[in-house]
Image: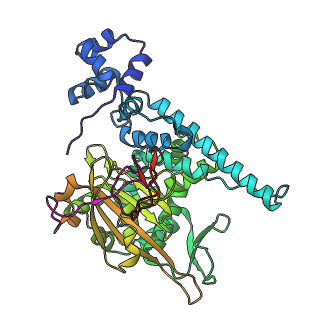
Amino acid sequence: MRQKFYAGTQIRRLREGQALTQAAFAERLAISASYLNQMENNQRPVTAPVLLALAQSFSIDLTEFTQEDTEHLLHDLKEAMADPIFASITPNVQDLKAIAANMPWFAHAFLNLHLSFRRNSERTQLLNEAVSSGRVGTDEEPAVLLPYEEVRDFFHYRANYFEALDRAAEALGEELIVAQNAPSTRLADYLLDKHNVRIEAERVEPTSRFMRRFDRIGRVLWVREGLDAATRAFLIAYQIGLLEQEAEIEQIVSSGAFKSASAATITRIGLTNYFAAALLMPYDRFLAAARAMRYDAERLANIFGTSFEQVGHRLSTLQRPNARGVPFYFVRMDRAGNIIKRHSSTRFQFARFGGTCPLWNVHEAFEIGDRTAVQVAEMPDGIRYICVARQANKAVNGHLAPPRHYALGIGCEVAYAQDVVYADGLDLRNGPVTQIGVNCRLCERLDCLQRAAPPIDRPLVVDPERRDFVPFRFR
């Protein structure tokens, strides 16, 4: 389903940067001033002829002239407004849409301010706990997750795609990676030939958390003994990224204007991981295979010698202009429902704070062994998704090693069902649809039997003469 393209904010910034009036700018584009005014206010979409005229008249790079992610921005604004500090305010959705579409700079500033408020509230709470427990004056510093939240938003608002990094990885991957061959062997040879770095296995105790370390002086990459082939290949590809893409990664990091050194460091790691995945699964070849296999993640993992998790992450990055794949989300979750990793090029709404909907099938993955669960789910905004979930058991290299279990989830909108193998056998017209939400705090569904808490912006209805399965109701 092709979406209309709105870019009013970008057009207005470009015009103001050129110091042109709407009339003069419109004349350069061979359109009317009224049409330009409607586009700048997101009342009319930007058409292909207008984009071409912008490129020709102002020498802009259309791959950088992208639409502000208003769907994600709108969702984040709604979630922030659900905070108890705004309890007396009932936000108008149309007003929030106008802010997200026409003043994204203000929306981001508001979200940053709200994030800072939450961080300071958490620090105050931790400080109160420290006072109560007598820990004041010690070297303990209250833990704040702001750097990870900042990095999450950085990838989130860039649709998890980085053009220059992806193309560099693809160029090298096409040279080195041969389908159905062990990629770690070719990568190890390249690392030795190009960078004089050899790979050695390090034997550690089963309970050790160690995976890799690089000895710069001795030019040795030490990797944990007993790792599976997919993980070993990824760690080698990661090291190649560290050695060859430092300048490009630094340029991307500098564009993020991070508030802390920790956030910048985490982003460097995330971008190097991105390069490693793109190296193992070169864009054009991976996209062609994904289309041919109808996005069957299990088959793609076998073809490229990678894991389901690595394939799921890669599927969420297929957003190259003029060569886009089906937009997917990818998520990794632990048994407690904590989202450890998430990436998305879809409109699927993730909670910035708090838990996830218990009706989402990613929770079911822990109960079904090696099978794959498929669910048709509908979010409160009415968009339906094909949700795929399965369990991932990380290798245990000894009896004493604690097992590690995760749930992996990928999904796309039902509109792409004909392109995706996971839709086969589903009755998309009359079959069951699970009504899920972002989390209970934000969900307004009245009839959910799994609700754990009322929506934060709705008044409770307390009736001592009545009892339901859910112990509260709301207006």
On the image, the x and y values in percent for residue 194 come to 50, 62
Q: In which quarter of the image is the N terminus?
A: top left
Tell me what residue is drawn at x 52 percent, y 44 percent: 83
Task: Identify which residue, 94 or 292, lies in the foreground.
Answer: 94
Instruction: Classify residue 199 by image quadrant.
Output: bottom right
Query: What's the colour scheme?
Result: rainbow
In percent of width and height, residue 288 lies at 23, 59
Residue appearing at x 80%, y 55% in the figure: 131
Residue 17 position (above or below residue 252): above
Q: Nearer the viewer, residue 311 or 367?
A: 367
* Secondary structure mainly formed by the magenta segment: loop
Q: Which residue appears farthest toward the bottom when viewing the image?
A: 399
Q: In this view, does 93 lie above or below 406?
A: above
Residue 459 percent location from the top left of the image: 46, 45
Q: What stretch is highlighted in magenta?
A: 426-449
In the image as oriented, which residue stretches furthest toward the right?
Answer: 137
- Residue 170, by quadrant, is bottom left
Front one among 252 and 89? 89
> Which of the two residues, 37 or 216, is positioned nearer the viewer here?
37
Give the left or right position of residue 264, taking residue 387 as reference: right
In the rendered image, residue 404, in percent from the top left (x then y), is placed at: 51, 77
**In this rendering, is residue 302 above or below 294?**
below
> Is residue 336 at all visible to an observer of this figure?
yes
**Quick check: 425 left or right of 53?**
left
Name the residue located 35 percent from the left edge and 59 percent from the top edge: 448
Q: Number of labelled discs?
A: 0
Whether residue 189 is visible:
no
- Indicate left or right for 271 with 423 as reference: right
